[in-house]
Image (spheres, rainbow, N blue to C red):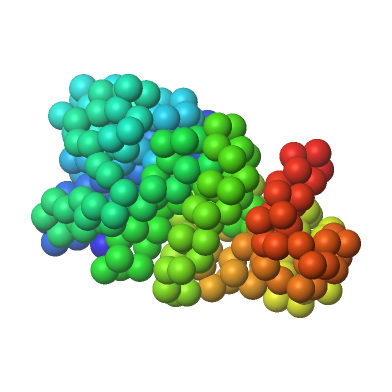
Amino acid sequence: MFVEIVPCLKDNYSYVIIDPKTNKTCVVDPSESTPIIKFLEKKKLKLDYILNTHHHYDHIGGNEELKKKYNALVVGYKGDKNRIPSIDIEVEDQQTWSSGNFNAKIIFIPGHTIGHICFHFFGEKILFTGDTLFSLGCGRLFEGTYEQMWTSLEKIKALPRETKIYCGHEYTKKNSEFCIAYDPDNNDLKKKINEINKKRLNNLPTIPTTLGDEIITNIFLRSDNDDIKRNLNLVGSNSLEVFSKLRDLKDNF
Ligand code: ZN
Ligand code: FE
């Protein structure tokens, strides 16, 4: 399975998944149709499935046109069927969505929205996290609670560390500035920031990252870490309290 990054809008990433054996394809979160169509035409491919992580316009904006052009089927969360345009296949938490060689476990991860899911291609160890987990960050709480988001991040944390993370936006550099401000002695983070800066200087995506990398560098996933608690003057607080504080600080950073 190949995953190709298709930049959309200002800082969104859509992803085209290609099965080289059958030439079947999926697109994850098409913000808009034009860049996806251009990409598919260049590769002489058609589109079979549209996978949506959540209903925000910058993740579903291309649904209708792509569906019309390719007869592709839209896969989205059952609980959000009224907000995912042109949904065809409704999926639920813990279900495995399969078609041909595509096998993705659906994990319900509310917080950013109350209908957010991720697609875990467990065979390939690939995870599409939408706007829940970013590299060095996490999504804003537009609809859900701190507790929902923290629980969702913990679900992701439990997956294999080699898992490749493909998220919805190129926010990594900005996120890294927040992480280092509250985690200044983290050498793994410093190393990652060097890599990020090099990539961005050359206009390269910082995605995919890996879950293992994120667990040691992404401050939101480190809400249970004693160094972070000390840096925030929250020694004795639980992880949810630390996470909530971090989310508030980031909103005003
Ligand atoms: Zn969003
Ligand atoms: Fe988004």
- Do we see residue 234 in this rendering? yes
The C terminus lies in quadrant: top right
Does residue 228 lie above or below 55 as drawn?
below
Q: Residue at x 76, y 77 (%)?
A: 187
Rendered view: 20 above or below 65: below
Q: Is residue 99 above or below residue 85?
A: below
Q: Nearer the viewer, residue 70 or 63?
A: 63
Q: Quadrant of residue 75?
A: top left
How far across and down, in percent of the image, does residue 4 sit? 38, 53
Q: Is residue 39 visible?
A: no
The residue sitting at 42% across, 30% down in the picture is: 55
Q: Is residue 26 left or right of residue 101?
A: right
Query: Toward which corner of the image does residue 117 lie, by quadrant?
Result: top left
- Given residues 151 and 57, the one toward you in this image is 151
- Residue 16 in the image: x percent, y percent? 33, 47
Q: Is residue 28 above or below residue 241?
A: above
Looking at the image, residue 135 sits to the left or right of residue 74; the answer is right
Q: Is residue 68 left or right of residue 28?
A: left
Where residue 12 appears, as percent x and y from the top left, is: 52, 39
Quadrant of the rendering where the N terminus is positioned: bottom left
Direction bottom: furthest residue: 187
How many numbered marks does the figure carry? 0
Position of residue 54 measured from the top left corner of the image (x, y, whole percent): 42, 36
Q: Residue at x 39, y 48 (%)?
A: 108
Q: Residue at x 52, y 61 (%)?
A: 154
| Rendering quarter of residue 218 | bottom right
Given residues 12 and 211, the one toward you in this image is 211
